[in-house]
Structures are given as C-alpha cells and as structure tokens.
Amino acid sequence: MPPWKLGLEAIAQVPRCGAKTRKGTPCQAPAMKNGRCRMHGGKSTGPPKGSQNAFKHGYYTAKAKAEREMIWELLYESRLLLMQMT
C-alpha cells in the first residue's frame, strides 16, 4: 500500500468534533484536545499575559489628543509668523 494511502487512513480515524452545525448535522471537522474543532472550541481567552499583541499604544487617549492639538496650533501660528516676516 502506498504511504499516502496510510496517511489518509490515519486521518479518517481521527476523532471528530460532533458539535451540532447550523444544518443540524454533527460537525465532521477533526477535534482538538478539548474535544471540539477550531470553529466550535469556544470563546478565545485572549492573548497570554505579557504578550506584545496586547500592547496598548495610547494614541487615542485624551492626553495624546490634546498634545497633538497643541502641536498643530503651534505649527499653524509659526507658519503665520513666517508668512508675515516675508
């Protein structure tokens, strides 16, 4: 028997999810460790502690917005001053 057929047989014997689909039939996707597939495994618990994916940058905080507004006003006033000098 060719090696690729052995792989197909092994895949066919993997435990299945079994959750009820929208159609009402059991899900046939391969199950993970928790017994459900990746689509029916439940809600994500979020990124792990200390993960850089959970980093909050603070761009939209009130302090940052006020600082940007102050910088824009300063730029505007300096352009006006430069225009008056020329």
Image (cartoon, helix red, strand yellow):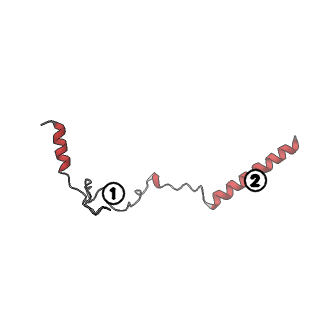
Give the mark, 1 or 2, whose residue is nearer the N terminus: 1
User: Where is residue 42 drawn, in percent x and y?
Assistant: 34, 62
Viewed as shown, does residue 5 lie left or right of 26?
left
- Is disc 2 surrounded by few (<14), some (14 to 19) or many (20+) residues within 10 Å? few
Taking 19 as reference, is 79 above or below it? above
Furthest residue toward front? 23
Q: Give the residue at x 16% y 45%.
A: 9
Identify the residue position indicated by label 2 in the image. Answer: 73
Identify the residue position indicated by label 1 in the image. Answer: 39
- Label annotation for residue 77: none
Q: Secondary structure at mark 1?
A: loop
Disc 1 residue type? Met
Viewed as shown, does residue 18 lie left or right of 67?
left
Q: Give the residue at x 19% y 49%.
A: 12
Disc 2 residue type? Glu
User: Where is residue 14 drawn, in percent x and y?
Assistant: 20, 52
Mark nearer the viewer, 1 or 2: 1
Q: Give the residue at x 37% y 62%.
A: 43
- Is disc 1 surrounded by few (<14), some (14 to 19) or many (20+) residues within 10 Å? few
Quarter-wise, where is residue 1 in the image?
A: top left
Judging depth in this view, the residue of 81 and 15 nearest the camera is 15
Furthest residue toward top? 2
Q: CA distance from mark 1 to mark 2?
A: 50 Å
